Amino acid sequence: TGSFSAESLDRAIELAHKSILLDEGRAEPHALLGHLYFLKRDWNRAIAEGEKGMALNPKGEDVTYWYAATLTYAGRAEEAILLLEKEIRRNPFAPSRYFLTYGDALRVRGRFDQAVSAYKKSIQREPNAFMARLSLAATYSMMGLEKAARSEVEEVLRLKPGLSLDSLEKMSAFKDPTETEKLFSALRKAGTPDKPLPPQPEKPSIMVMPFATLDNGMSQEVFAEGLTEEITTALSKIHELNVVAEKFSFMDRGEPGNGEQASRRLGGQYQLQGSVRQSADKFRITAQLVDAATGNHIWGERYDREGKDIFSIQDEITMKIVSALQVHLTEGEQARYYGKGATSLDAYLKFLTGRHLALSLKQEDNIKARKLATGIIDLHPNYHAGYTLLALIELQDVRLGFSKSPVESLKRSAELSRQSTALEDIPFPHTILARIDVLMRNYDEALEKAEKAFEMDPNCADACMTLGHVLMMMDKADEAVPVLEKAVGLMPYPLNNCFHNLAWAYVVSEKYEEAITAAQKAIRIEPNDILARLVLVCSYSFLDQQAEARSEAERVLRINPNWSVDESEKWLALNNKDKVRAIHNAYRGAGLK
């Protein structure tokens, strides 16, 4: 089972010996006994029993495999390679473990390129085979391919979150300790932790502590409590954040150490702390973001305001604090643009909610987002975000096959983007215009607009992502991939669209394992991400994993029963007809029509 005690191993060896006594002529009990001695690290007996098994049945699958595995880890990798190559030639459908052990033998002999190929075949047969991915990571590390190695370790830690070098030490099988040292050194360099990492949340969690009042006074108390509740309510509407213990803090006001105790009790990663001081009509509000586990200061700001309308001041400060927290905890620097020109906290929060709904890629969510966008425009016609949101929704309707008149939807999207730009010339509207040009096959114009958005702010993840998307659609995937990887890195917690864009670039580059990994990350964030599901349909098809491809195709139709290959052929704007044809053939082969 992979988990056994010394006593159970000894008992298994005893039973294997009894089996051999009953029938000396069968090879399998000798192969099993050799494997058991291998697990016990009794190399001489393991090899001896393996040789007996091979003598009795040299064509037996498990007989050959276990003997080859013993030779690999006992320091006789060249012999193992010859045995496994012969067995793989004889059995083209050899199981995943054959290619894993074959890869290990090749790696030990320094034949890294061949080892990589073997590990990839092992993963093709069993995508969740974490040992094959771990061995692939070590090989990439030994080859100096640090980024590829780290990517594989990340996927291993997703499959086995508690894995560490400490836990692997118990599984180390090499007779020669220097081989184990080389393996562990490569894995450590690739990012494998020495000790198990604590579980990583899918989104950051924050606890809003009560804003303290620095002078006595009922008006300060009222203002501070109102501000705390306003911020807590606003943050709870941001899907990418998890707000914990919204009401607990008022019971503990003024008690030293309560913040640290609350963090331990309630599990918040971060604390928002603050204070209020009032003098006549003047308010001084301070806020700071703190790592709850370490106490390290992440961000802080002071706001001086004057006026009698405390509710207006509360709204303004809440919007500024929420925007700052998004920069540091969710979407990075681009979050600074969301609130530009906003005079209403309500409109700002509606935009954030609508944007999340639009990125879920579901028709019913797009309808909800449309209502929010039109509401913003009706009540706040000078706030650019309402027009940007509605432009995004019109574009999504076309991309996902929801629009009854795609050409008209694209025209409305372009006009709304221009209206937004007239109010605030920021990157987002330009990214939408670039994507519209891609759909219309105006590639040069699309690249010009995408480059303009990127030049306006190279640290805007959406601008970076759009540039990568345009390059990919122009069939320049090798240029697109590093740009899209940068977009992912610009967000502390990347959104699903970052990963599905990167996944498609990998598909166009014919890097299907990498495409699957990126698409799975998008789906963990948004399970209904139909574009990521389509990546999986293609990638599994191209890797000849038809069962997995059909399963993902069924999920596509559950998300959108009206999705069709015919509609996709109209709007998949990749500037390479052969690749477009291959993608749609993959869809049809998986059962999509």
Image (spheres, grey):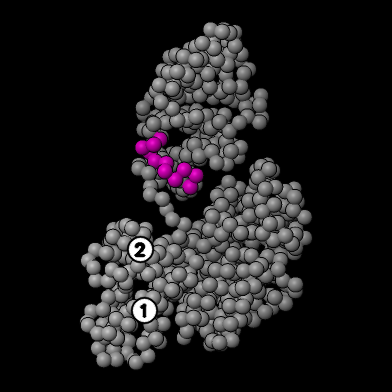
Q: Looking at the image, do the residues carrying marks 2 and 1 touch, with CB atoms under 8 Å apart?
A: no
Q: Position of residue 232 (x, y in %)?
A: 40, 72
Tell me: residue 494, above or below residue 457: above
Residue in view at x 54 percent, y 17 percent: 31
Tell me: residue 463, above or below residue 100: below
Residue in view at x 53 percent, y 76 percent: 351
Q: Where is residue 113 in the image (x, y as percent from the top left)?
A: 53, 37
Amino acid bearing label 2: Tyr
User: Per the image, is 159 magenta?
Assistant: yes
Residue in view at x 29 percent, y 86 percent: 219
User: Per the image, is 371 magenta?
Assistant: no
- What span is in magenta? 158-168
Q: Mark 2 points at which residue?
A: 270
**Mark found first going from the N terminus, 2 or 1:** 1
Under tag 1, what secondary structure? Answer: helix
Outermost residue, front side: 251
Amino acid bearing label 1: Leu
Mark 2 against mark 1, which lies toward the viewer? 1
Q: Nearer the viewer, residue 59 or 561?
A: 561
